[in-house]
Amino acid sequence: MIYSRITGTGGYLPDKVLTNYDLEKIVDTSDQWIRERTGIRERHIAADGQNTVDLAEQAARRALQAAGRDPQDIDLIIVATTTPDRVFPSTACLLQKRLDRHGCAAFDLQAVCTGFVYALGVADKFVRTGSARCALVVGSETLSRVLDWKDRSTCVLFGDGAGAVVLEASEEPGILSSHLHADGAYEHLLSVPGGVSQGYDSFKDGKGFVTMKGNEVFKVAVNTLGRIVDETLEANALDKSDIDWLIPHQANIRIIQATAKKLKMPMDRVVVTVGEHGNTSSASVPLALDVAVRDGRIKAGETLLMEAFGGGFTWGSVLLKF
Ligand code: COA
């Protein structure tokens, strides 16, 4: 039996930090409101000319280094992103060029904030079926480019960043299961309404920016993430107490706390980066993983539950032995 195992993690955040106090000067908001409603204190913003592939490359190189791998070892690249640099080629192909790796499969995966969880689930299937032995799985976003910086209900929530893992074939698990879901009936609650096939005019009048019915998204997210936790535990015949670490999507501390409560998990077993990163969409889970691996909290052999929820709606989880 072939399993897939994470053998290295990497993360990258742009240098520029935008605090809640900085935002007070841009829109009618306050540090107190943002912290109390979301848990966010600051977020990182990509510099002019710094694009999604630039962030992805940094995170990817760090993950490769941690895994002791060279770009030539990679036989699959998946980049989860909703903010690709171009209509085409994919950001994965642009990353492949940066890494000077030629010929292996490379593609983007778009599942918004659930993108990395989807990408890890897909890469796991490639590895388990023998189609890949060493996959590079990246979540990279420049969400700041699709925010309306005059809309206080959205611009305070998001940030830029990238996270990556190297996923390799192994005789030992590894990824135990992945659970991926979507329901497009909710597309109107969270979206960027403009799009290429509608013509470039569709980006006018603010339609190129994130629009969101925040409190409705909040309710569905809490319920859905509660259900995915049950589904994941049941599929693996595990008890809540078997999970060592929860690595949730970092959108809002209140959503994270609700999932932790459902798992009866103390918050010191939950990796929380939302305060410093904001919501970095598909980068949020791999960035949180990387932070907790590098600071020594997450150790080899521990059981991790990753979960995410995002536009679509999409949602999913990955349960794994680290
Ligand atoms: N600063 C100050 N006030 C703000 C504000 C801001 N940045 N944004 C909104 N408000 C105001 C609203 O205008 C509203 O004012 P009103 O009562 O006078 O109409 C009030 O705050 C409450 O707004 P509401 O949207 O009900 O707040 P909330 O408690 O639901 O918190 C979110 C808003 C967005 C933080 C919260 O709903 C949320 O996190 N939702 C999920 C978002 C998410 O996770 N999205 C990504 C999924 S991947």
Image (cartoon, rainbow, N blue to C red):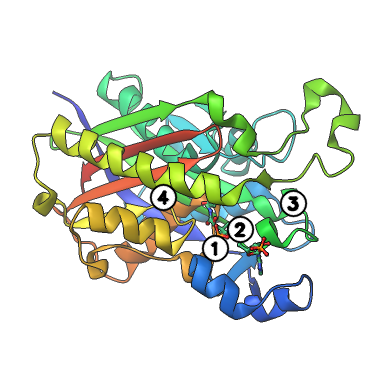
Q: Which amino acid does label 3 sit on?
A: Arg
Q: What residue type is labelled 1?
A: Gly
- In the picture of the structure, the residue carrying the numbered disc 1 is 278
Question: In the rendered image, which quarter is residue 28 located in?
Answer: bottom right
- In the picture of the structure, the residue carrying the numbered disc 2 is 158
**Residue 322 horizontal/vertical position (percent):** 21, 50
State how far apart marks 4 and 1 are (Cα): 25 Å
Locate the N terminus and report the quarter of the image it occupies. top left
- In the picture of the structure, the residue carrying the numbered disc 4 is 64
Toward the viewer: 103 or 128? 128
Image: 59 above or below 98: below
N-terminal of the pair, mark 3 or mark 4, is: 4
State how far apart marks 3 and 4 are (Cα): 28 Å
**Mark number displayed over residue 124:** none
Q: What residue type is labelled 2?
A: Phe
Q: What residue type is labelled 4?
A: Leu
The residue located at (28%, 18%) in the rendering is 129
N-terminal of the pair, mark 4 or mark 1, is: 4
